[in-house]
Image (tube, rainbow, N blue to C red):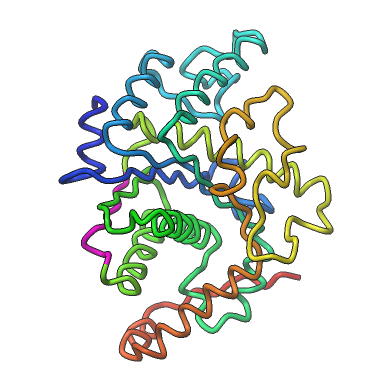
Amino acid sequence: MNAREVVSIAFGRGKGWLVSLRVYLDGAGKEEANPVITVGGFLADSDLCVQIADQWNDATGGRVFHLTDFGTKSCKLGSRDWTQAERTAFLMRLAAIVNQPGVYVVSASLEVAAFNTVLYGAAHPQELGPASSGCAYIAVLNVETLLRNEQRQRQEVSYVFEKGDREHEITKTFADWDKKNSELKDMRSHAFLPKKTTLLQPADLVAGMVQRCVLSAFNTHPTVGLDNGLARTRLQTFDRNYSPDGVTAAVVTGHDTTKCWVMNAQSFTFLDKIGKDFFERNPDELRKRLKQAPYKPKVTI
């Protein structure tokens, strides 16, 4: 699949903004195993996405890049046999492709235990949980807020995710979002494409590097966590946990104060209130939801 075909699938008709939100559910970002998870990616217009895909394929030779495989025998690029300097140089090249003028690098991270704690007392926990779905939902809301602030919310937007075992939950998240934002639903779409899709690989890099940063920050003070008492915390707050080789900074610089966030408990409580208000205005929707199998959040001890 070439770059133009990828973009045409993502956008459908017309031009808009591509938001490649990659839910990072590998070993570094599984809610069942890690205290923090991340959703990350980028947004850019369709023409720039074609350029990004071409540049990425030039760098990788058309082979699939996956950050968790990089430097191992599973890497399709053969990076296991590279020196550390060669690996860093290659990642810096990829970072420059995704973090270029016209591209917005975005991410949302959350502490799983804090999220589950809020959900356990939430009025409608099924609207946000489980944590991976909640993180994707929050990432989408952050992007929509960004578009609204820049008066671009009336543009057509297509969200693209990697195919995987979270498709049902993410699809449900978008269905819920459409009902709560009916004036925009005909301008929004989402798709699930395979990992080998070129434009999902830069999203993998963003999500992976941000995840490493926030996991390092959490592990530095595990009893305190990442919550600073505000609704969300700028990723730049944890810049001391950026990788020493400069790759994290190369990926997120210029975006880590306004577009890359660690979401805190106050945000989760606010989103539960949005759901509660929605159901008070739409009791028929609530009755439909109550007929579905309820989501039961884990109790955090």
Which residue is the extreme one toward the left?
A: 13
Residue 267 falls in which quadrant of the image? Answer: bottom right
Residue 156 is left or right of residue 282, and the answer is: left
At 35% across and 62% down in the image, what residue appears? 174
Viewer-nearest residue: 136 or 75: 136
Above or below: residue 255 compared with residue 85: below
Viewer-nearest residue: 149 or 176: 149
Above or below: residue 172 compared with residue 49: below
At 51% across and 20% down in the image, what residue appears? 75
Write the start and end of the magenta stretch as one range: 184-192
Residue 82, horizontal then vertical, whole percent: 60, 8
Residue 295, horizontal then vertical, whole percent: 49, 74
Residue 236 falls in which quadrant of the image? Answer: top right
Above or below: residue 92 compared with residue 199: above
Q: Quadrant of the C terminus?
A: bottom right
Residue 211 is left or right of residue 183, and the answer is: right
Residue 42, horizontal then vertical, whole percent: 44, 40
Residue 290, horizontal then vertical, whole percent: 40, 85
Residue 245 is left or right of residue 272, and the answer is: right
Reply yes or no: does residue 229 show up in magenta.
no
